[in-house]
Image (cartoon, grey):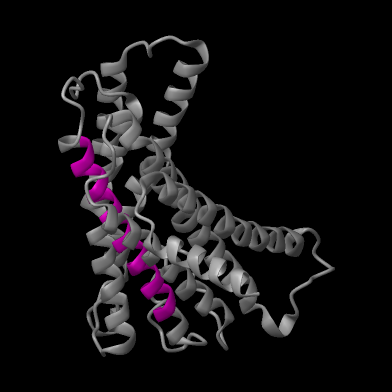
Amino acid sequence: MTFNKSSQRISFLSLVKNCNHKGLGIYYLLSAFIFGISGTLISVLIRIELYSTGNRIISPENQNFYNISITLHGFIMIFFLVMPGLFGGFGNYFVPIFQGSPEVVYPRVNNFSILILSLSYLFVILSFISEFGGGTGWTLYPPLSTSFMSLSPSTTAYLIFGLLMSGISSCLTSINFFITILNLRSYYLTLKTMPLFPWSLLITGGMLLLTLPILSGALLMVLADLHCNSLFFDSIFGGDPIFYQHLFWFFGHPEVYILIIPAFGIISIIISSSYQKIIFGNQSMIFAMSCISLLGSVV
């Protein structure tokens, strides 16, 4: 019994103190898998609810639960499945290998990022299990997210806290990858000869560092409207709810390419390894991904 307790204690401490990039990459992938299961269950609930018009599984007295399911499904699939899996998981595991470096440049910051990500997921789930959930949609549009006529403004605050912490985690990971790729490469590896996968993460990290502060500012303005008597998005007192949509989609449109560009790099590497040939037009692919990120950010 003593051995089991000590082994459990050692495994928990190794989880918290682990700074190895491969171990953290595996933790990211496992976390994304677990988060994805919860998002998939919510999507199954939505599909069962929409399967027929007569037989409903959500009671008429609690129709807000359907809106909560839509909101959480969008949050979990985007911010807690695809981004941690493709960007954090594969990036942490493979970037130092492709770079020829022993580790990322900030291993402890790397560990801190995944701990913050887990805490942000707890905040999102806290909004789900509280007395009234926040059925605002995953875009958090005002006036749904700022009106006190909603069932519970505190659940919107939980969602915002979860997104802010997830954004901090993504920014720390982006800085880590950015500096690792630029400054911790092997001597013989230039930017022209660097594989496509590190290039895809470099471009994705740049987009995240450019757009996530805008989203964080918009979410803080929503939080201030809810709890600090500000009037950023209240049209009755001169606010502009459309202004939030401009701020949100400054992040939301590049987010599409933040999700897909790491997948472009992974697909290119898999095809190149499977057929044992170099990628045709490597620099053209790098230029294409850079143009996609630039146009996706300013559109």
Does residue 92 lie above or below 14 as drawn? above
Which of 199 and 188 lies nearest the eye of the viewer? 188
Which of 33 and 162 lies nearest the eye of the viewer? 33
Asked whether the viewer can see residue 204, the reply is yes
Residue at the front extreme of this rendering:
2
- The magenta span reads 157-181
Q: Quadrant of residue 207?
A: top left
Residue at the right extreme of this rendering:
55
Q: Quadrant of residue 143?
A: bottom left
Left or right of 58 in this view: 188: left
Left or right of 119 in this view: 36: right
As for residue 176 lying within the magenta part, the answer is yes
**Residue 57: x and y, percent?**
78, 72
Asked whether the viewer can see residue 83, the reply is no
| Quadrant of the drawing holding the N terminus | bottom right
Does residue 36 lie above or below 122 as drawn? above
Residue drawn at point x = 19 percent, y = 24 percent: 191
Residue drawn at point x = 31 percent, y = 55 percent: 110
**Residue 31: x and y, percent?**
51, 57
Provide the major secondary structure of the magenta segment.
helix
Does residue 89 lie above or below 195 as drawn? below
Count of marks placed on residues: 0
**Residue 260: x and y, percent?**
42, 38
Left or right of 29 in this view: 179: left
**Residue 119: x and y, percent?**
42, 71
Does residue 274 lie above or below 109 as drawn? above
Residue drawn at point x = 31 percent, y = 23 percent: 195
As for residue 244 lying within the magenta part, the answer is no
